[in-house]
């Protein structure tokens, strides 16, 4: 697995290939379509991310000291956003995730190019990933 910094740099590079935000949204939609199937039985209230306008479920499993995230959303752009986040952070240690600043989100301009409600949802997704990581720090 590549380092966290390299994974974030790769996302920044991927997004820099697109000149227009419409193309970046299409890329996010494609990421969401590629998201691993989320079991219906995991779509429970305790896995819902609070603060998102659309419904976003996030589950975490700890294996060999690494956090493995799975997620789903009922909104296509939001599904792409959570897919982007878990593609960077899934498979990493709780300490590594909890200590990260998620700066690539600002570098790609994601927050500033979302509607206020989606930007709030993004903040909630990041907060939830950080909280889950902090809960699993040893």
Image (cartoon, grey):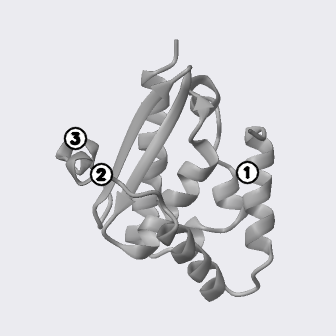
As displayed, is residue 48 above or below residue 133?
A: below
State the image coordinates of residue 50 (x, y, percent, origin top left).
Answer: 28, 50
Label 2, residues with CA under 10 Å away: few <14, some 14-19, many ≥20: few
Classify mark 2: helix, strand or loop: loop
Q: Quadrant of residue 89?
A: top right
Taking depth in this image into account, of 37 and 107 the one nearest to the observer is: 37
Of marks 3 and 2, which one's residue comes earlier in the chain?
A: 2
Taking depth in this image into account, of 60 and 51 the one nearest to the observer is: 60
Residue under numbered circle 3: 46
Contact? badges 1 and 3 (CB < 8 Å): no
Residue drawn at 64 percent across, 41 percent down = 101
Classify mark 1: helix, strand or loop: helix
Of marks 2 and 1, which one's residue comes earlier in the chain?
A: 1
Residue under numbered circle 1: 8
Label 3, residues with CA under 10 Å away: few <14, some 14-19, many ≥20: few
State the image coordinates of residue 80 (x, y, percent, origin top left).
Answer: 50, 67
Residue under numbered circle 2: 39
Label 1, residues with CA under 10 Å away: few <14, some 14-19, many ≥20: many
């Amino acid at each position: 697995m590549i380092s966290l910094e390299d994974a974030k740099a790769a996302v920044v590079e991927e997004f820099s290939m697109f000149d227009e935000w419409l193309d970046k949204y299409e890329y996010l939609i494609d990421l969401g379509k590629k998201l691993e199937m989320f079991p219906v039985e995991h779509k429970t209230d305790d896995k819902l991310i609070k603060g998102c306008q659309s419904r976003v479920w996030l589950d975490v499993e700890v294996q060999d000291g690494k956090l493995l995230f799975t997620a789903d959303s009922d909104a296509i752009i939001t599904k792409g956003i959570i897919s982007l986040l878990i593609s960077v952070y899934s498979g990493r240690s709780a300490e590594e995730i909890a200590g990260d600043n998620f700066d690539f989100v600002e570098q790609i301009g994601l927050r500033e190019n979302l509607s206020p409600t989606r930007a709030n949802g993004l903040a909630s997704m990041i907060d939830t990933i950080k909280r889950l990581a902090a809960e699993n720090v040893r």
